[in-house]
Amino acid sequence: MPASTAPDDDARAVVAVVVAHNRRELLLEGLAALAAQTRRPDAVVVVDNASADGSAEAVRRWAAGPGAGGLPVDLVVLERNTGGAGGFAAGLARAVRHHGADAVWLMDDDTVPRPQALAASVAAWRATGAALVASRVVWTDGREHPMNTPRVRPGASAAERAAAAAAGCVPVRSASFVAVLLDAAAVRADGLPEAGYFLWNDDFEYTTRLLRHRRGVACPASVVEHRTRVFGSTDADPGERFVLEVRNKLWTFTRSRSLGPRDTALYGGATLRRWARTLARSSRRPVLLRGLVSGVRQGLAAPPPTADVLAGLGAVSADVLAVESAAGRPLGAAARVRPAAALPAGQLPPFSVLLPVWAGDDPAQLERAVASVTAEQVLPPEEVVIVRDGPVPAPVQAALERWRREGAGGVPVLVHELAANAGLARALEEGLRRCSHDVVARMDADDVSLPERFARQLPLVAAGADLVGAGLLEIGADEDDVVGRRTPPTGAERIAAYARFHDPFNHPTVVYRRSAVAAAGGYRDLPLMEDYWLFARMIAAGARVENLPEPLVKYRVGAVPGAGAYARRGGARLWRSEVALQAHLRREGFTSPAQAVRNVLVRGGYRFVPTRVRTVAYRALIAKGAGR
């Protein structure tokens, strides 16, 4: 039995994904090498791309036999060959959605990792915090394989090079799928590879997409063998497949968000030079020229969405749709309208809506809020839990009694009444205890949820997120009177960094796991700051967090700035809450001393700025700038 990992490594789940097509014996060698790792993966997902050589049955026999040594193997058999691009997209979706992976180790079926390979990659991942760790790829004779050389990051800063070197690594801008460890948080944020590429350049497009705003490293200590039939480089004659090289590169340079202008010029120039060398050396130049023309013609059209390419494959399609939807990626015509409805029954978790009500709420606005989360939702909840925070006016009480008896929009409504006003934190804690489901969506009594809200957020929760927010539209007295827009930060790293200075979530938009809220200590009383304090503790506790940038809620700020939501953001009471919040965050180690002082001065001082000035500043600096 291989050596086990250290306890702190074991806390992070690493899932290996192997994509296979008609290379049964090499596939079995690779699986044996995975079982022999000194740091074994927590599970292996084998994606059989419609092999005709008995690969699937051979994997089943191997997984049940002594060679696997108890290594969990999840075999995914595709009905049709989706190419390397489709296979890796399907495997990644399976790993992050069904296995809850913290990191995913991708490799081809002709890749045989040496025993220390995964241990070295995991150590580099932990030491550098990189979103991607590429292995050193060698051929069968030990020579560096030129087909799989990671591209060193041009213009990497001295600090970035030093940080990578301290872990025995080098900063890179792209890598090959032959053996690469990916941080699952980056996968959840940016979605899956472009399955429409089928073969070639899918790994280049995807890894450069992940690394456009993140760090990646190559780890020479992590060594794998790429057992190709011949030793060759990327400018070898591709024959009829040259059309794929041309089409996919054009898609990458013109359609993908993976490269900035400088990188496009740099890699575009290198591609043209390589194509020229390939054409000059080829003995089948007419074949390549036809491929060039056809590739250019195909490359002028947009690639089909990954969710469309991998549709009709049962559970695989559900996994892909969930991850792509959660990342805000294109879903295709059918799924774009109702992404949740395209998932098989039972693929999305049941959820409750939690809505507090108090004496100051307007009856008409409350009716509108409840309708927006029930009858109007593409994906309605299983229940609505309303917490009455103390006595309310008669019209509000009448509505509560009606919903208690009849439900709302076909959704059961549970009403829990507090005898006296206890404040938002206490009301939400009481409500969470009465929710029937672990997944809970927040809603305020004067806001409006857009019809696609839960259909957009629940797939992300199904993919493993613990806390999901969204953008919102600020509205005046009338819900069609849009006066502002808030775009939150996206991606776990940006959210965590942003949270040191601002609340990274719009509270009325969030969907969270009740268990993750409880693990962070739940809501605690801190007037108008209870949500920020909770979210900071959830991030510090390791909750998986994400935001959808598009607005999914209309948030009522009021028609008169001096009496609406912006007025509530100022004054001595909120300044005291601000000071208390910063003291808590500093004491809990969430912020540094310098950050705490800065926050008290800047955020605290902001509370005494005149309301109209504060409104303009907030919209300019927060509402429109958070997602940058």
Image: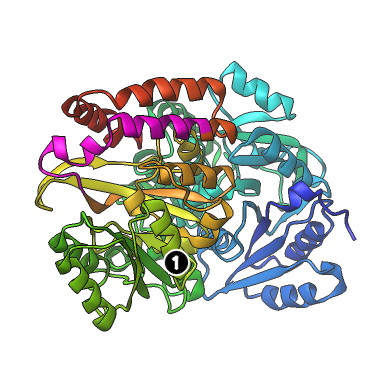
Front residue of 423/283: it is 423
The relative height of residue 443 versus residue 274 in the rendered view (above or below) is below
Task: Based on the picture, tell me whether residue 568 belongs to the magenta stretch.
Answer: yes
Quadrant that contains the C terminus: top left
Front residue of 181/153: it is 181
Asked if one can make out residue 408 in the rendered structure from this viewpoint, the answer is no
Residue located at (10% from left, 49% from top): 477
Task: Based on the picture, tell me whether residue 595 belongs to the magenta stretch.
Answer: no
In the image, 243: left or right of 627? right
Q: Which residues are magenta?
A: 556-583
Amino acid under disc 1: Leu
The relative height of residue 607 versus residue 516 in the rendered view (above or below) is above
Residue located at (43% from left, 77% from top): 344
In the image, 10: left or right of 508? right
The x, y position of residue 281, in whole percent, is: 56, 37
The x, y position of residue 245, in whole percent, is: 47, 47
Q: Residue furthest top?
A: 158
Q: Which residue is mark 1?
A: 310
Front residue of 484/585: it is 585
